[in-house]
Each structure stands twice: as structure tokens, then as C-alpha cells.
Image: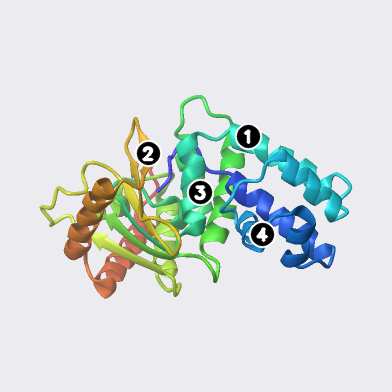
């Protein structure tokens, strides 16, 4: 699901400000209706800003800071989120916002374990693969990824349907111990009520997913959206034709994937194999 070389920060910039606005409003003991009246906005607009569905400009942030008695604190958060947004590629900011709005994510990954299902050591090994990266950048990306996992795996997180190529279970990343831990983690993740992991077996002759990884996001109040990943290009689109094509690919992969019990059995077998395999010198 992720660009392996760059991990989104903890929240999309727009959502970050919304979280702080809500916190300051609650600390002030003010309801959305009262704040809306003071600012001259509708209650629905206040609600959309707090949910990260609508951007806030500086005039709004300044007025809200005054109304809530934040003494510049809320305005500082707005400035930080603007700086944060400026560091994000457009497609990456859009992806994080899409994830936060979606109630269902359907994903296909032919190369590595998806970021939201990675163990810390597996993720660390992935980040180390970027040319010229520094240990500091590796750790920063790792902490951001772990926080993103907590956001997506929470009780109010989206339902996740993940299909992995069997090659993902075989490809060595980090070490034998890292792989054994990662396989065990995948099996555990499938016990989560909102996470479902399936494996496309090597015996399948299906070529539908060989072009690259993708994610389909859907939810109330948002258009169905596709995130399409390749080595040289990552893009997000709500174009109905592209989304329809991506959905067709997902359905073909889902139909060829092993059912839940067989997928879990294969994942657990690979965990045992990686555990028994002697360390590479």
C-alpha cells in the first residue's frame, strides 16, 4: 500500500488541524453550534474541519484561536500543519486523507507485506533499502508507520481486505528471524475483526496483479478511489473508469486467492519454515 521509500506522517495535514481544533473546543467547554455562531460558520462546516474533510485557512484558524481562548496555540498548530503539508507529495497527502475517510480498504500487494501489516523489524529492513538513507530517517519513518498502523487498526478503523502474492511470504527481508516474526504477525492480524488476509498461491497462472500493487478505498460521503503503485509512479484517482478497472482486477485476484483457512495455514507453515531455517552467514 505504501511507497516503500517514504512513509506518511502520523495524520494527513488537514486531519491534524481538525484533531487539535476539536481538543481546544472541548477544553473550552464549547459545543460545535456555539463555535459556529461565534465564527459565522455553519455547524456542518465546523464538523467537517474537525473530521479533516475541509481545509481551514489562516483567518479561520486565527478566529477560532481567539474564540476558544487558545492564546496562539491553535494558530501555531495550523501553521505547523501547513508546513507539514508543504513537505508531502500531493498524491501522498491525498492517500492519507482517503484512508482516514474510508470504511473499507481492499488491497493487493505482489512484492512486500503491506505497511499497515508490517512488524517493526520488517519495516525497518524495508526502509534501510532506500539508497543513501540515514539511520535517523529510518527511525523517523518507522515511528510514523507504527502510528499509522495504530490509526488504521483501531476499533473505528476501516475494514481491510489484503491479498498477498505467495512470493511475499517467501522473499527474504531483514533476516530469517525477521521473516518468522512477520509471518506470525500476519496470522495474528487475521484474527483482528476488521482485518482479513488472503494469499494468492504460486500455482495460480493469473497475471492480473503483475503490473503492481493497488488499493481500493470506499466509504460514505466519498467517491470510490484507487491508489495505484509502481516503481516509478504512485497515483490516486477517482476516475470511474480507472476505479472500475482496478476493482475488476481485485475481484479476479480475490477469486483466485486461497480461502481464509488455507491462507492462514500457508502463512503459519511459512512462519515455521523461517523459524527452522538456519541463519544466513
Q: Is residue 132 above or below residue 53?
A: above
SS at badge 3 = helix
SS at badge 1 = helix
The answer to whether marks 3 and 1 mark residues whose Cβ atoms lie closer than 8 Å is no
* Dot placed on the residue nearer the N-terminal end, 4 or 3: 4
Instruction: Identify the residue at horizontal 13%, vertical 52% (top origin).
Output: 206
* Dot placed on the residue nearer the N-terminal end, 2 or 4: 4
Residue situated in front as seen by the camera: 61 or 263: 61
Image position of 265 (left or right of 248): right
Q: Residues within 10 Å of mark 3 (few under 14, many from 20)?
A: some
- Circle 3 residue: 96
Viewer-nearest of discs 1 and 4: 4
Work out which quarter of the rendered image holds the C terminus and state it.
top left
Q: x%, y% of residue 182? A: 43, 57
Instruction: Identify the residue at horizontal 22%, vertical 62% (top origin).
Output: 254
Q: x%, y% of residue 38? A: 80, 57
Q: CA distance from mark 1 to mark 4?
A: 44 Å
> Could you say which disc has been placed on residue 42 in the image?
4
Amino acid at each position: 500500500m505504501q511507497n516503500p521509500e517514504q512513509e506518511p506522517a502520523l495524520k494527513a495535514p488537514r486531519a491534524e488541524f481538525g484533531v487539535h481544533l476539536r481538543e481546544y473546543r472541548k477544553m473550552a467547554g464549547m459545543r460545535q453550534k456555539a463555535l459556529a455562531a461565534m465564527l459565522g460558520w455553519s455547524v456542518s462546516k465546523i464538523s467537517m474541519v474537525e473530521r479533516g474533510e475541509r481545509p481551514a485557512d489562516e483567518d479561520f484558524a486565527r478566529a477560532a484561536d481567539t474564540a476558544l481562548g487558545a492564546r496562539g496555540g491553535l494558530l501555531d498548530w495550523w501553521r505547523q500543519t501547513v508546513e507539514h503539508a508543504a513537505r508531502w507529495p500531493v498524491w501522498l497527502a491525498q492517500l492519507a486523507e482517503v484512508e482516514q475517510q474510508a470504511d473499507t480498504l481492499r488491497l493487493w500487494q505482489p512484492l512486500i507485506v503491506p505497511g499497515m501489516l508490517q512488524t517493526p523489524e520488517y519495516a525497518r529492513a524495508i526502509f534501510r533499502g532506500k539508497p543513501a538513507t540515514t539511520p535517523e530517517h529510518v527511525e523517523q519513518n518507522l515511528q510514523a508507520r507504527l502510528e499509522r498502523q495504530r490509526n488504521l487498526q483501531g476499533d473505528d478503523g476501516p475494514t481491510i481486505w489484503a491479498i498477498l502474492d505467495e512470493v511475499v511470504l517467501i522473499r527474504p527481508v531483514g533476516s530469517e528471524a525477521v521473516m518468522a516474526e512477520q509471518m506470525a504477525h500476519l496470522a495474528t492480524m487475521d484474527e483482528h475483526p476488521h482485518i482479513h488476509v488472503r494469499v494468492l498461491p504460486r500455482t495460480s497462472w493469473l497475471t492480473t496483479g503483475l503490473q503492481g500493487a493497488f488499493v481500493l478505498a470506499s466509504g460514505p460521503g466519498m467517491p470510490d478511489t484507487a491508489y495505484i503503485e509502481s516503481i516509478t509512479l504512485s497515483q490516486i484517482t477517482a476516475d470511474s473508469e480507472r476505479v472500475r478497472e482496478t476493482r475488476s482486477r481485485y475481484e479476479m485476484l480475490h477469486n483466485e486467492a486461497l480461502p481464509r483457512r488455507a491462507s492462514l495455514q500457508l502463512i503459519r507453515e511459512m512462519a515455521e519454515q523461517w523459524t527452522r531455517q538456519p541463519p544466513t552467514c
